[in-house]
Amino acid sequence: MSAPVFDELEVGAVVAEREITLTRDHLVRYAGASGDFNPIHYRDDVAQSVGLPGVLAHGMLTMGVAGAVATDWARDAGWVKDYQSRFTRPVPVDAQLGALVTVTATVGALDVDARTARIDLKVVFDGSTVLGKSQLVVAFA
Amino acid sequence: MVNPDVQGRVYPSTVPYLVGREKVREFARAVLSESPIHHDPEAARAAGFSDVVAPPTFAVTIQEATLAQLLADEEAGVDFSRVVHGDQRFTYTRPIVAGDELAATLTIAAVKQLGGHSMVTASSDIVDAEGAHVVTAISTLVVRGEE
């Protein structure tokens, strides 16, 4: 796969799509990598005691894997200047089945003078989007 | 309720965090990021960086120490068991690379009360060993009110 070329990008074009089955293994790995050891991300009993259906994915894990879809597309063509998301819905992760999440990355806007591309990330779990206004800005070299 | 008087409060700079190459790789694996610039120093150098580049959400690991300051501030009154992460933003001057020594300064940008909940906007400015800005990490924390 070759890196994208700024001058060839078009607003509205889907540049990457990925289906990811998040499992409890991913949550444990992310807890260790990030240092976020909130037990609602690995203990059903704790999650249920605060009114949740069960263990949830870290919002920052969902945001992280969505961002990776964009950065894997961008490769070494640029670097990320800005990345934002709202956490609009939780992602419960079943102990056996995990949680199937789909990520679609679309060119949302281009700034020709600054040579930046805004990539809009749509992240869907169980038929609903789980991140709002998830936008990542790549600065091209 | 979160104390509205903490709006504008600035906390002391955190102890510098040394960004390790293996930590960057570990974080990149955890977010399923395969781009060679996160894993291979040669690929990162070829792209113009001094070492492996951290994924954009990596800054949360440095911001974490500042949020711990907020939670430990009894005057602020943030009950961690009632906190929900509302939104998150990272605005970079340059990417984080392995070898960076980063310190963060937290400012409470806003405290709002909304329908029984409190919303705290926590803004952490992260600078390198020379004091140059690298990234600002902004979180909105929603603190659910008592039933």
Image: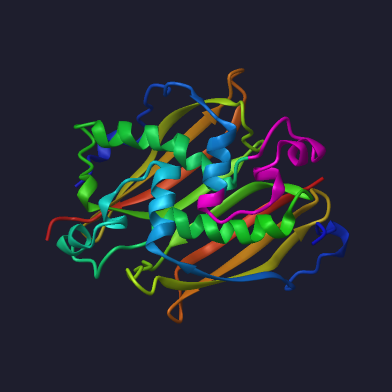
Of residues B95 and B140, the one drawn nearer to the viewer in this rendering: B95
Q: Which residue of the protein is positioned furthest toward the bottom in this rendering?
A: A127
- Is A99 positioned to the left or the right of A84 in the image? left
- Is A53 positioned to the left or the right of B66 in the image? left
- Give the image location of residue B93, x and y in percent: 65, 36
Identify which residue is drawn at 23% across, 42% down: B78
- Give the image location of residue A75, x and y in percent: 74, 53
Quarter of the picture containing the C terminus of chain A is top right
Identify which residue is drawn at 38% across, 21% down: B12
Q: Is residue A101 above or below residue A112?
A: below
Residue B74 found in image quarter:
top left
- Give the image location of residue A21, x and y in percent: 48, 70
Of residues B67 and A3, the one drawn nearer to the viewer in this rendering: A3
Residue A26 found in image quarter:
bottom left
Of residues B59 and A72, the one drawn nearer to the viewer in this rendering: A72
Quarter of the picture containing the N terminus of chain A is bottom right
Q: Which residue of the protein is positioned furthest toward the left in this rendering?
A: B147
* Magenta stretch holds residue B139: no
- Give the image location of residue B107, x and y in percent: 41, 33
Q: Which residue of the protein is positioned furthest toward the right in this rendering?
A: A7
| Residue bounds of the magenta highlight | B29-53
What is the total number of numbered labels drawn onto the structure image? 0
Identify which residue is drawn at 55% across, 30% down: B19
* Magenta stretch holds residue B30: yes
Q: Is residue A75 above or below residue A119?
A: above
Q: How is the image coloured?
A: rainbow
- Is A67 positioned to the left or the right of A97 in the image? right
Q: Which residue of the protein is positioned furthest toward the top in this rendering?
A: B130
